[in-house]
């Protein structure tokens, strides 16, 4: 399964995500929540494989919401799907329903990346925007033109893992007084001029743009706050699957899934895409899937019980 349902977005780790809910296969009347609905690629496959009574779906992107309203009219009219525009954290804050299945497939979708006017791509000239929610207050240009240089240093170092963003930040700080930054190419051009192509084939703007996107959309902060709320809202036995594309996101997910005693990490080893998937879909390359289950960890079968019983049997 790797279809892009005409939207250009190929759902990542699709089979693995569908299988992550396998222990609910025999159950009916399931309540599903998808916090990063996008074009619904994962939902489409999940819906075919599980008996879902009600789907709550959220996305902070207005285009994703418009597509969902258009594509899922049947479920909406039967009151089997509720659509929420906003961040999954805002959804979690107001949700009173218990959930059997939760999916977060973090980051941006192909339709967002592919549209120059959304400002996510350093390869396409567009406004320096990067807001996933078109109604959000601050764009990437607002941060670049107004933040204190120390804050920009912090963003690029922490979120982008840029070892030394000092010269880029200094240049931004000097230039923006004369001419504010308004376009992606303006910023990408400056980064390329100052940092140069240190690694072959790796545009120096990559990490800066990733860092800015995380800051504009407060992606790490939202994730950190939302996960414990969703763990609370999970039904006993319910499953919560998260796909991350950034090491800091993965660390947050792993730690929050490990540090609670109301459930457990189902997959000890993180699930990553096959080479074949990465070849077909380059977006999948950095994907990691972690699965959490609410409830008590099933006890492992005791492999040595029979041998011990034999050994301890009183000799006659
Ligand atoms: C990787 S795409 C999801 C693709 C989807 N699973 C599919 O198969 O079509 C991520 C989507 O999540 C949305 N998103 C990212 N962070 C979000 C958040 N904190 N709250 C709500 N939506 C978010 C983005 O706007 C984007 O549409």
Image: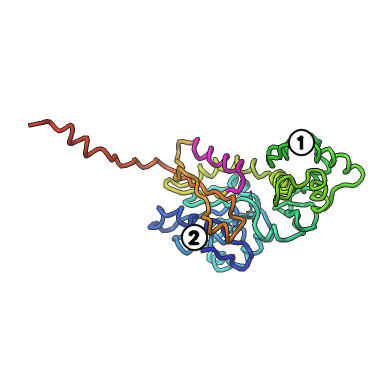
Residue that numbered label 2 is attached to: 46
Which comes before the other along the chain, label 1 or label 2?
Answer: 2
Image x and y of residue 215, in percent: 71, 43
Q: Is residue 210 left or right of residue 267?
A: right
Image x and y of residue 302, in percent: 29, 39
Q: Secondary structure at mark 2?
A: helix
Q: Secondary structure at mark 1?
A: helix
Q: Tell me which segment is drawn in magenta.
A: 244-259
Image x and y of residue 157, in percent: 71, 37
Image x and y of residue 286, in percent: 59, 50
Residue that numbered label 1 is attached to: 151
Magenta stretch encompasses residue 250: yes
Q: Does 52 sit above or below residue 153?
A: below
Q: CA distance from mark 1 to mark 2?
A: 41 Å
Main SS category, magenta section: helix
Question: Residue at (40%, 57%) from the top-left corner?
Answer: 25
């Amino acid at each position: 399964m790797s279809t892009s349902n005409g939207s250009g977005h190929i759902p990542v780790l699709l089979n693995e995500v569908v299988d992550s809910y396998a222990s609910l296969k025999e159950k009916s009347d399931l309540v599903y929540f998808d916090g990063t609905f996008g074009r619904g690629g994962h939902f489409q496959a999940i819906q075919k494989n599980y008996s879902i009574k009600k789907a709550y779906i959220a996305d902070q992107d207005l285009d994703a919401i418009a597509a969902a309203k258009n594509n899922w009219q049947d479920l909406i009219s039967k009151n089997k799907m509720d659509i929420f525009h906003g961040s999954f954290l805002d959804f979690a804050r107001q949700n009173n329903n218990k959930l059997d299945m939760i999916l977060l497939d973090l980051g941006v979708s192909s339709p967002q990346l592919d549209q120059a006017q959304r400002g996510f791509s350093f390869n396409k000239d567009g406004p320096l925007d990067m807001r996933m929610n078109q109604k959000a207050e601050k764009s990437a240009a607002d941060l670049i033109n107004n933040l204190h240089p120390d804050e920009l240093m912090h963003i690029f170092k922490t979120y982008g893992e840029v070892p030394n963003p000092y010269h880029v930040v200094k240049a931004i700080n000097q230039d923006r007084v004369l001419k504010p930054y308004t376009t992606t190419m303006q910023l990408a051009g400056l980064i390329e001029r100052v940092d140069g192509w240190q690694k072959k084939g790796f545009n120096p703007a990559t990490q800066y743009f990733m860092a800015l996107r995380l800051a504009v959309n407060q992606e790490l902060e939202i994730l950190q706050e939302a996960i414990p709320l969703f763990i609370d809202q999970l039904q006993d036995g319910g499953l919560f699957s998260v796909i991350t594309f950034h090491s800091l996101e993965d660390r947050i997910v792993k730690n929050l899934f490990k540090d609670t005693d109301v459930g457990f990490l189902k997959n000890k080893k993180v699930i990553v895409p096959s080479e074949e998937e990465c070849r077909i879909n380059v977006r999948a390359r950095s994907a990691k899937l972690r699965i959490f289950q609410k409830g008590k960890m099933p006890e492992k079968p005791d492999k040595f019980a029979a041998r011990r019983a034999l050994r301890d049997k009183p000799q006659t």
